[in-house]
């Protein structure tokens, strides 16, 4: 299975939209040189979602009347989906790396 850089970037953009991160528009065929920064921001966003879900869960457990069970469940699901998307992106990146490393020189 061949994975091109542009298809990987398109998939990452789609995952960012699903995770609630605003998409960055770029000209076709041009890959951003700040891939590391983009990845770091995405991981930070996932970490923030997980922290928010944990905070809401703790507040609900402590008896905070301003937190609804539905808010806790929605935050938990958002964090779970964002984490799963991150794992899928990581798996695609590892597959792409293996493909590149197996290319004859």
Image (cartoon, rainbow, N blue to C red):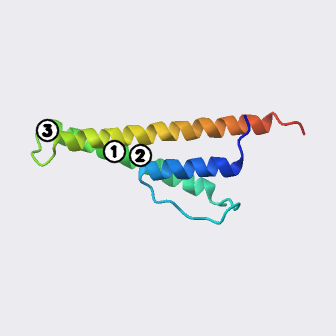
Judging by the rendered image, the residue that carries numbered circle 1 is 51
How far apart are the two marked residues, 1 and 3, measured between alpha carbons? Answer: 16 Å
Dot 3: few (<14), some (14–19), or many (≥20) neighbours within 10 Å? few
48 relative position to 53: left or right = right
Eyeballing the image, is 43 above or below 33? above
How far apart are the two marked residues, 2 and 3, measured between alpha carbons? Answer: 22 Å
Judging by the rendered image, the residue that carries numbered circle 3 is 62
Q: Are marks 1 and 3 in contact (CB under 8 Å)?
A: no
x, y (%) of residue 66? 12, 49
Residue at (62% x, 60% y) in the render: 34
Labelled disc at residue 72: none
Can residue 54 be seen here? The reply is no
71 relative position to 27: left or right = left
Eyeballing the image, is 35 above or below 68? below
63 relative position to 74: left or right = left
Of the numbered discs 2 and 3, the one sitting upstream in the chain is 2
x, y (%) of residue 30? 69, 62
Q: Are marks 1 and 2 in contact (CB under 8 Å)?
A: yes
């Amino acid at each position: 299975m061949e994975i091109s850089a542009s298809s990987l970037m398109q998939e990452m953009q789609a995952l960012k939209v699903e995770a609630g991160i605003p998409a960055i528009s770029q000209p076709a065929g041009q890959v951003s040189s700040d891939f590391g920064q983009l990845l770091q921001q995405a991981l930070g966003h996932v970490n923030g979602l997980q922290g928010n879900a944990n905070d809401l869960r703790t507040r609900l457990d402590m008896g905070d009347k301003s937190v609804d069970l539905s808010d806790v469940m929605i935050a938990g699901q958002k964090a779970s989906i964002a984490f799963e998307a991150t794992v899928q992106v990581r798996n695609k990146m590892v597959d792409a790396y293996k493909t590149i490393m197996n290319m004859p020189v």
